[in-house]
Amino acid sequence: MKVAVCPGSFDPVTQGHMDIIRRAATLFDKVIVVVMTNVAKSPMFTQEERVDFIRRASAGMENVEVDCFKGLLADYARQKHATAIVKGLRALSDFEYEFQMALTNRKLNPDTETTFLTTTSEYMYLSSSLVKQVAQLGGDITGFVPDCIVDDILRKVDEIKQCERKAVK
Ligand code: PNS
């Protein structure tokens, strides 16, 4: 059985991520989407919230599982006997960082190949940071993220604003 791991911080999952997950699911017997820690980012959503968002968005994709892991991606891939790590590539700007991660992961776990799927042109511009920024500034995020999580994002943005207002008082 060919297993692929699709890692990311998914803060939150976007339509661009979902496009990669959907396409990976046609190439592998099983795809495990794993919510991980990116030490360079401070997430807006908890790990549980991010897992829940992807579970709801991928409901009906029969060979897709959702998980979370706090350690090294290379170790997780080994534990799951993954043939491949699947990542989406949007633009040249993603390449250097992704290339560095792919080489590090190969050194740590030579049994798992990193593979890249090029993002569908419709989602080239899209990122989780952009979604959060648009939501925080009152813009419409419909179409950027799966419909089933739009309200959760708006609720979180409201909660953060309320906390900030209380902190200022
Ligand atoms: O969606 P992101 O933030 O680009 O995903 C990056 C992520 C979470 C896949 C990366 O930071 C990662 O693999 N984190 C787990 C810890 C790890 O293995 N670090 C070394 C990567 S070479």
Image (spheres, helix red, strand yellow):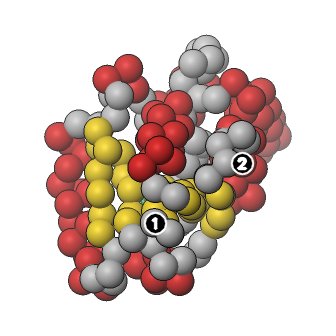
Q: Nearer the viewer, residue 104 or 41?
A: 104
Instruction: Categorize mark 2 by other alpha carbons within 10 Å: few (<14), some (14-19), many (20+).
Output: some
Report the number of discs: 2
Can you give x and y, in whole percent of width and height, for residue 64 in the image? 61, 53
Residue occupied by mark 2 = 55
Question: What amino acid is labelled 1 in the image?
Answer: Lys
Can you give x and y, in whole percent of width and height, for residue 31 in the image? 53, 57
Q: Nearer the viewer, mark 2 or mark 1?
A: 1
Give the position of the C terminus as an image quadrant: top right
Mark 1 lies on a secondary structure that is loop
Instruction: Categorize mark 1 by other alpha carbons within 10 Å: few (<14), some (14-19), many (20+).
Output: few
Q: Nearer the viewer, residue 82 or 93?
A: 82
> On screen, 155 above or below 49?
above
* Name of the residue lying farthest toward the front: 1
Residue occupied by mark 1 = 2
The residue drawn where x is 35% and y is 28% is 120
Q: Quadrant of residue 48?
A: bottom right
Any part of residue 7 in sight: no
